[in-house]
Amino acid sequence: MKYTFEVKELFGKLKRLFIPLIEKKHNNLRTGSRFEQIDNKLIDLSKRLDATLTKDRSGYPAILGAFEERRIDWVDNGIFKAIIIQPNFERRGVNTAIWNFINIAWFDDGFSIHRPQWIKLLADKVAFEVIEHNIDELLNVSEHNLTGIKMADLK
């Protein structure tokens, strides 16, 4: 009987020691970035445009939860420009099953209430894999769209 108790106690200690390590390894494998296959292309474009690449929104309001996204921002002749890859925002929060690929340009003089803007959705509510598979074309079209935007195009 004494040995049974010691074996159970030893098993309990081993379990408490190893289960967290196994869970940590499993979580690291499971929580790798979904952008892993396209991040280098986003980095290259942001360098070419002398832009800033931002990743994720971990500090976003808790009601929406933390989610992955990518955003390339730059200013060209006073026009703010961005390429945004983000999950779909819905009334109940962020839906990471469907994604959007957005081009946006806007003017903000810091004084006006109205901000003239131009928006083009290149992918609307699609699976992330669709964006991943078409990333070269999406980035080429985005670069063409946004480098060609002039103040007269903003509404």
Image: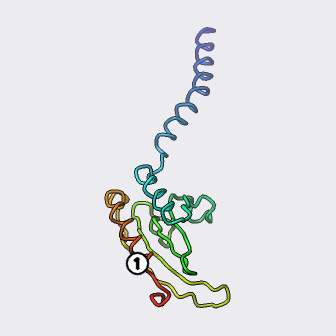
Residue 147 placement, left or right of 73: left
Quick one: which residue is furthest to the right in this view? Answer: 111
Q: Vertically, is 58 above or below 109?
A: above
Q: Amino acid at mark 1?
A: Lys
- Asked which colour scheme the image uses, the reply is rainbow
Give the total number of marks visible in the rendering. Answer: 1
Residue visible at 38% across and 59% down in the picture = 128
Q: Nearer the viewer, residue 125 or 149?
A: 149
- Mark 1, Cα crowd under 10 Å, few <14 / some 14-19 / many 20+, is some
Classify residue 80 by image quadrant.
bottom right
x and y percentages locating residue 34 in the rendered image: 44, 52
x and y percentages locating residue 28 in the rendered image: 51, 40
Residue highlighted by disc 1: 120
Q: Nearer the viewer, residue 66 or 129?
A: 129
Residue visible at 52% across and 35% down in the picture = 25
Q: Quadrant of the N terminus?
A: top right
x and y percentages locating residue 125 in the rendered image: 37, 69
